[in-house]
Amino acid sequence: MMNPFDQLILIVDDHEENLLIASEILRGEGYQTATVHSGEEALEFCKARPQAQKPLPNLILSDVMMPMMDGFTFCKVLKENPATENIPVIFITAIADVRSMTKGFDAGGVDYITKPFHAQEMCSRVHVHLSLADMRNELAFNNEQLIQLNEEKNNLLSIAAHDLKNPIASIMTASVIIKKHFAKMTADNILKNVGAIYDTARRMTDIIGNLLDINKIESGEIMPNIMCIDVNETLAKVIQEYDDRAKEKLIRLEMTRPEGTFAIDADTVMLRQIFDNLISNAVKFSPPEQSVHVVLERVQRKQLRNSTTDTDDENNDEMVQISIQNQTSFLSEQEKQKLFSKFGKLSNRPTGGESSTGLGLFIVKRLVEAMQGTVWHETAENISSNAASGTATALRFIVQFPRSRK
């Protein structure tokens, strides 16, 4: 609901007495007011406000008959500027004939107030047009939201249609081979095709899972079930699960971790999903015969990037850090900015033909932050690589969580 105390009204009149009367009436209703003596001053006022990081007027009361620039000309110039075109302008005039009113409406005005002022009439008209402007702004915002939601829906449908088409075709091909040649096939050949169907179905499950996860995150349905978890154990299990996939691409999964427990307060399912996405990406985008390095360590809070949290609790100063580094093709600075964005597909593609929705890192960031953690990336250029061409990039993703006090 509109609050008068938040509304700034600019009054434009070349007579000081009119400025004082109008300002006194509106301030009596709780509105903020500013006054200027000409159309030129009013335009300069509106130009200077954003530069000073101050809000524009919510409404303007403008006299019609002023020297140099009359009220109609002022209003027309105001409406030609996209930054000020939506500010309602109510004209103040002693002559409210039909011709003048029509000219004012043509210039972009929304209403008239006649002189001498009637306080009740002025306040009623101002309130009505501020309310209408508020509703228009809200409607415009809602329309923008709907447009964005529609674009995201189309993106989701496009991803589903595009990324599921090839796996479905692969399943159909393998199924047809078994159906046609079952009697002549050896057990090994049958198992090979069944394995291909299973692997493809797993890819499809991953794609659908990401699409469903993003919907749950955006709607606020995912709430962390926080408990004390040993990161060492969870991370080791996820790495073991990806070991076979990595070996298929001749990629070495290497983990460095000290002995002991690395306890954090987190949601088991979310933490596993974070590691799953990061390690999956590392394997997907690494060229063959490369290494994916996973390092688990304890660090001090001062090493935490972009942290604004201060604490005197020594236990809470220690962080558990997980870094996952792999080699990928060169990324431009613009692409690096898109790494954690939704649908942030980049120019480099998975090196083994795997699917990629562009949602994995966005999901990682949202899940990490939901558990009071931080995630970022670092790059080191010109790392030695077996890539056929182009500059290789060592891409390292770092996740930090506060060490559990329990």
Image (spheres, grey):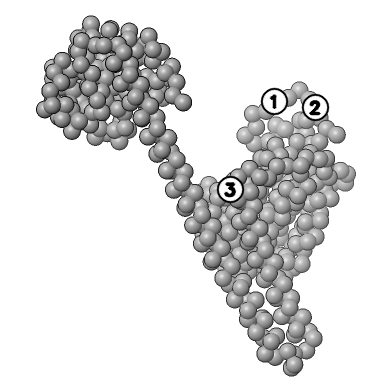
Q: Please give the name of the residue rendered at 63% of the width and 55% of the height, measured from the top-left corner.
A: 212
Rendered view: 37 above or below 276: above
Q: Please give the name of the residue rendered at 82% of the width and 43% of the height, measured from the top-left corner.
A: 229
* Residue 170 at x, y percent in the picture: 62, 76
Q: Which residue is mark 2?
A: 314
Neighbour tally class for label 2: few under 14, some 14-19, many 20 plus, Cα within 10 Å: few
* Residue 18 at x, y percent in the picture: 23, 9
Q: Which residue is mark 1?
A: 310
Q: Secondary structure at mark 2?
A: helix
Neighbour tally class for label 3: few under 14, some 14-19, many 20 plus, Cα within 10 Å: many
Q: Secondary structure at mark 3?
A: loop
Q: Amino acid at mark 1?
A: Asp
Given residues 37 and 299, the one toward you in this image is: 37
> Label 2, label 1: how many angstroms apart (C-alpha)?
11 Å
Given residues 342 and 150, the one toward you in this image is: 150
Identify the mark nearer the N-term, 3 or 1: 1
Identify the mark nearer the N-term, 3 or 2: 2
Q: Which residue is mark 3?
A: 340
